[in-house]
Structure formats: C-alpha cells, structure tokens
Amino acid sequence: MHILHLDSSIQGAGSASRTLTKAVVANLLDQHPGAAVTYHDLVEEAVPHGPIGAGFRPLAFDVSDEATRREYARSDALVGEFLASDIIVVGAPMYNFSLASQLKAWLDRVIQPGKTFRYTENGPIGLAAGKKVFIVSTRGGSYLSGPLATMDFQESYLRTAFGFIGIKDLDFIRAENMSRGDDARANSMNSALEAVSPLVARMAA
C-alpha cells in the first residue's frame, strides 16, 4: 500500500491542518504498518505557477528549452506518484473561501488528459478510480450550514476535481470556527482528532 501525504498550509508548525493530516497518516500506518508514505510540503516544495505551469500541455515554443523540460519532468513525476498511490491524505485549509494556491497548482499537474482522465464521445471519464482520499478541511468560520454555506468553494471544488478523475471515495475531516477564539479552536481540533480513528477504521473494515 502506498500513501501520498500532502500539506498546503502556510502556517508552518502552528497549522491545524498539518496536525490533523499527521494524525490521519499515523492512524493509517497503525492499520497498515507496511505502507510506504510519500510526503510533499506544497509550501516548501511549491509547484511553480506560470505559463508552462501545467508542463504536459502542448507548447508553442521549443521543447528543448531547459525550463520547459524541467516542468515536463516535474509533471510526469507528480502524476506518476499520484497514480501509484492507494490513499491520498490532503491538508486543505480554506483561504478566501477556496483552497491554497499551492494545492491548486498540484492539482493542475495531476489532472492530466490521457493519464488521469480522457475525453470520449460521451464526455470526459476519470482514469484514477479506486483510490481513497482523506481531506482535512480547516476553516476560520462555519460553512457547513447557515449564511456562509454558499461561500464554500473549497470542499465543492475538491469533490469536483477528484470526481472528475474518477475518485468518488472521499472523507472530509473538518475543523471549523478556527478563528472564533481559543475555546472554539480547541473544541474544533478535539472533535476533528476524535473523528480520525473511526474514519480510518471504517476504511479497513
């Protein structure tokens, strides 16, 4: 079994999502002690944005360009390790109602035509089915219901993006109200940490 562990929080050691993804991976390793783990800190190892950011798309200039070849190689490596993974653990803090640009840049590399999806006469179909994804979703306010629910473009985007490439088995571990004071933050973290073990155990059942 191969676990791909991704963090995208800019908060470093104080990050709630990093604490929670670490707990998910630890529980997975308890259940599957022989599993291999590939880890990427998408802040420290940022995937470049820019005109050749996707790397695999058709190019309008010389493919012998060193920067272009480097980005093609990066894209191939990222999509290769993604396809080789059985479980993906994603730390996804909400920034401005959506996700970190670092995580979006990674997704742009792995959502590749011909590799993780393909076009057909009946529309695109995903090629990455059968994987399990745990998404740690941390937010400053409460977006599951109430007046802020329509402003949540984080979880809906992630469901759509992974669903587009064929992955329907997603579990969300949520810590909301993280900016509503120390008590609210502590309660949210405790609830989220308590949710980890049952979710991982359910997968193994």
Image: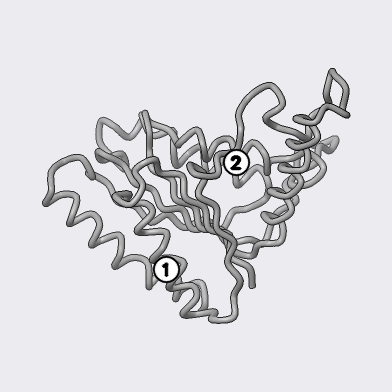
Q: What residue type is labelled 1?
A: Leu
Q: How far apart are marks 1 and 2 (CA)?
A: 25 Å
Q: Quadrant of the rendered structure where residue 121 is? A: top right
82 with respect to 16 (left or right) = right
At horizontal 25% and vertical 30% (from top left) the residue drawn is: 147
Q: Which of 128 and 91 is in front in this view?
A: 91
Q: Residue 106 carries which label?
A: 2
Q: Which of 8 and 195 is in front in this view?
A: 8
Q: Residue 199 carries which label?
A: 1
Q: Mark 1 or 2, which is nearer the eye?
A: 2
Earlier along the polypeptide chain: callout 1 or callout 2? 2
Q: What residue type is labelled 2?
A: Trp
Label 1 with label 2: CB-CB less than 8 Å: no
Q: How crowded is the residue under tag 2: few (<14 C-alpha within 10 Å), some, or many (20+)? A: many
Number of numbered markers: 2
At horizontal 64% and vertical 24% (from top left) the residue drawn is: 50
